[in-house]
């Protein structure tokens, strides 16, 4: 079992933590009073004004010595054509044969510099798994960590930043 010592409280925690957003950033830009009219938000998709389309997926970051990755639950925009295809193949037994789809990250993290609109690819996965989000290989810290992995100490830092 994965264990780490929290960088803030010094307690030991078990299990790989992960964090995610319940909606894309663009959703929060819509005034609260207008969201019921302008937005259609589900657990995995979001449509704003019948013009902006988002899907939920996972940025997976390898952790040194761990069997499972650290996961960020994020939202990525898709164009209408790719969003419609995404919806059409949700029940397909081998939906991983579709895509990948280009999109823009619609997420913010307090542990990284500006991440809104980082370029990303949405890779569909089989067996009902949320899509894997691959960030463009840039020198942005989040993209670097996705490619090169993070230490257990970094997991503890991320946990402390979000839980304390």
Image (spheres, grey):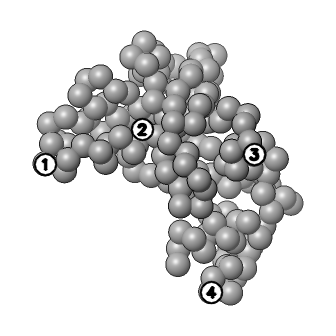
Q: Is residue 64 above or below residue 61?
A: below
**Separation of residues labelled 2 and 3 (CA atoms):** 26 Å
| Disc 2 target residue | 44
Work out whether residue 97 or residue 20 is closer to the camera in this orientation and state it. 20
User: Crowdedness of circle 4 by 10 Å Cα count: few (<14), some, many (20+)?
Assistant: few
Mark 2 touching mark 3, by CB under 8 A? Answer: no
Mark 2 touching mark 1, by CB under 8 A? Answer: no
| Disc 1 target residue | 33
Residue 11 placement, left or right of 58: right
In terms of secondary structure, where does tag 3 sit?
helix
Instruction: For residue 128, say whether it is visible.
Output: no
| Disc 4 target residue | 9
Q: Residue at point 74% right, 53% down?
A: 68
Q: Quadrant of residue 25?
A: top left
Question: Which label's residue is closer to the chain start, 4 or 1?
Answer: 4
| Disc 3 target residue | 144
Work out whether residue 138 or residue 84 is closer to the camera in this orientation and state it. 138
Q: Residue at point 52% right, 19% down?
A: 92
**Separation of residues labelled 1 and 3 (CA atoms):** 38 Å
In terms of secondary structure, where does tag 2 sit?
loop
**Separation of residues labelled 2 and 1 (CA atoms):** 22 Å
Question: Which label's residue is closer to the chain start, 2 or 4?
Answer: 4
- Given this view, does label 2 or label 3 mark the residue nearer the observer? 3
**Separation of residues labelled 3 and 4 (CA atoms):** 27 Å
- Given this view, does label 3 or label 4 mark the residue nearer the observer? 3
Mark 1 touching mark 3, by CB under 8 A? Answer: no
Instruction: For residue 147, say whether it is visible.
Output: yes
Question: Which label's residue is closer to the chain start, 2 or 1?
Answer: 1
Work out whether residue 39 or residue 142 is closer to the camera in this orientation and state it. 142
User: At which x and y percent is residue 124?
Assistant: 59, 27
Question: Which label's residue is closer to the chain start, 2 or 3?
Answer: 2
In terms of secondary structure, where does tag 4 sit?
loop
């Amino acid at each position: 079992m994965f264990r780490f010592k929290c960088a803030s409280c010094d307690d030991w925690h078990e299990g790989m933590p992960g964090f995610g957003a319940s909606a894309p950033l663009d959703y929060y830009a819509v005034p609260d009073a207008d969201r019921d009219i302008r937005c259609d938000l589900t657990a995995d998709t979001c449509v704003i004004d019948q013009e902006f389309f988002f899907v939920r997926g996972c940025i997976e970051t390898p952790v040194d010595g761990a069997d499972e990755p650290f996961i960020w639950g994020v939202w990525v925009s898709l164009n209408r054509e790719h969003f419609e295809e995404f919806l059409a193949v949700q029940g397909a037994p081998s939906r991983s044969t579709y895509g990948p789809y280009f999109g823009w990250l619609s997420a913010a993290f307090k542990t990284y510099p500006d991440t809104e609109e980082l370029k990303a690819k949405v890779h569909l996965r089989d067996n009902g798994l949320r899509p894997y989000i691959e960030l463009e290989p840039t020198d942005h810290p989040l993209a670097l960590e996705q490619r090169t992995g993070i230490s257990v100490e970094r997991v503890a830092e991320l946990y402390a930043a979000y839980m304390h």
